[in-house]
Structures are given as C-alpha cells and as structure tokens.
Image: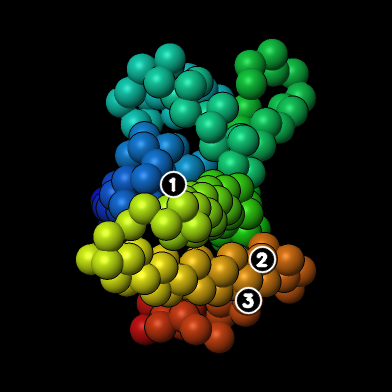
C-alpha cells in the first residue's frame, strides 16, 4: 500500500479509537469501526485482528458491541464460512443509534434520580421536622434540582428530536475539504 494511504489509514483508525474513548467506548471499538469504515470490502475477525495487532478474542468481543450499537453488521461472503463485517457508513445513523440507546437511558436515569430527590425533599418538609436552617437548605436544594431537571428535560427533547430525525444531515455542505480530481485542495 502507498505510504500516504497507509499513513491516512493508520491516523484515521487511531483517531477513531481516541474519539471512541472520549465518548466512553473502548479504544478497540473505535479502531475496529475505523478499520471497517476505511476498508471497501468486508473484513473477517482474523483480518481485523491482524490489521490492528490485537487478539481475535478482543476483536470478537468488541465486534458484538459494535453490532449492538448498529455501527457494523455481519455480511455474507460467497464461498466463505468465516464471519465477515462491514461498517455502517452513514454516520448520521451511527449517531442516532448511540444517542437513542445509551445517552437516552442516561438522561432518563438522571430525571428519575432528580424526581426521587424532589420527593424526598417534599417529604422532609411535610414531616415538619426540619430546623429553619434546614428548611432554607431544602429550598435551595429544590431550586438547584429544578434547574437540573429543566436541563435534562431539554436534553431529552433534543435527543428525541435527533433520534426521530429520518433525514441525515448533508455532511457534504459542512466539509472543510472538497475532493476534486482525486486530490485534496
């Protein structure tokens, strides 16, 4: 492979690994997705293990997660008994899958915890056993919790709108690069 092509492949795969780690996924998941995304042909677990220099067990375990997130899918290759995978190339679909899964659950959990906190504060006030200082602190807590609830309710609405969106963003309109005559200008 041409030296420049190899360098782009290596840096992109490594960059997706770092990006995956930033979002709470494993580095290996990001690198696997990058390897699949940059390969025009489906890849087997052996191919991925060899390219990324990681164990086949690690590849297999992480590929299950990647499939669950809708980032890649198993594909059939004529005449082959091995499992082959191809990346989901529509990044908007990948983003919607991740936001609709993990992030939505986290926001719902936060709203549940905040709702429970409000109930506890109201119960403490209703029992009438709070000192005047504790009553002030309870009011302060209620204000802060209400702010947090408003934030997470807004986040939930935004996530729902992104996940429900059927139209992919036109990433071509926002690209800082334009491919002309097979060269970057």
Work out whether residue 54 or residue 78 is closer to the camera in this orientation and state it: 54
Residue at x-position 56% and y-position 27%: 64
Work out whether residue 26 or residue 37 is closer to the camera in this orientation and state it: 26
Work out whether residue 68 or residue 55 is closer to the camera in this orientation and state it: 68
Between tags 3 and 2, which lies in front?
Answer: 2
Q: Is residue 162 visible?
A: no
Q: Gap in Å between the C-alphas at discs 3 and 2? A: 16 Å
**Quadrant in the picture for the N terminus:** top left
Name the side, left or right, on which 96 lies relative to 20. right
Name the side, left or right, on which 67 lies relative to 106. right
Circle 2 SS class: helix
Q: Position of residue 120 (x, y in %)?
A: 46, 51
Q: Is residue 108 visible?
A: yes
Comes first in the chain, label 3 or label 2:
2
What residue does disc 3 label? 169
What residue does disc 2 label? 160
Q: Residues within 10 Å of mark 3 (few under 14, many from 20)?
A: few
Work out whether residue 110 or residue 157 is closer to the camera in this orientation and state it: 110
Between tags 1 and 3, which lies in front?
Answer: 3
**Vertical relation: 162 (above or below) 185:** above
Circle 1 SS class: helix
Q: Gap in Å between the C-alphas at discs 1 and 3? A: 21 Å
Q: Residues within 10 Å of mark 2 (few under 14, many from 20)?
A: some
Q: Residue 94 lies in what quarter of the image? A: bottom right
Q: Residues within 10 Å of mark 1 (few under 14, many from 20)?
A: many
Between tags 1 and 2, which lies in front?
Answer: 2
**Vertical relation: 31 (above or below) 185:** above
What residue does disc 1 label? 34
**Vertical relation: 110 (above or below) 160:** above
């Amino acid at each position: 492979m041409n030296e420049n092509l190899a360098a782009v492949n290596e840096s992109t795969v490594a960059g997706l690994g770092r990006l995956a780690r930033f979002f709470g996924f494993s580095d290996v998941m990001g690198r696997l997705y990058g390897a699949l995304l940059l390969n025009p042909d489906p890849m087997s677990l052996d191919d991925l293990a060899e390219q990324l220099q990681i164990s086949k067990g690690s590849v297999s375990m992480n590929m299950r997660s990647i499939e669950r997130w809708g980032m890649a899918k198993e594909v059939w290759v004529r005449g082959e008994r091995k499992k082959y995978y191809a990346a989901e190339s529509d990044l908007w679909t990948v983003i919607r899958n991740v936001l609709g899964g993990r992030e939505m659950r986290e926001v719902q959990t936060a709203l549940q915890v905040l709702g429970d906190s409000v109930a506890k504060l109201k119960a403490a006030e209703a029992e009438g056993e709070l000192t005047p200082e504790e009553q002030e602190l309870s009011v302060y807590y209620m204000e802060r919790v209400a702010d947090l609830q408003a934030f997470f309710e807004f986040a939930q609405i935004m996530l729902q709108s992104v996940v429900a969106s059927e139209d992919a963003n036109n990433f071509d309109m926002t690209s800082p690069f334009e491919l002309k005559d097979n060269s970057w200008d």
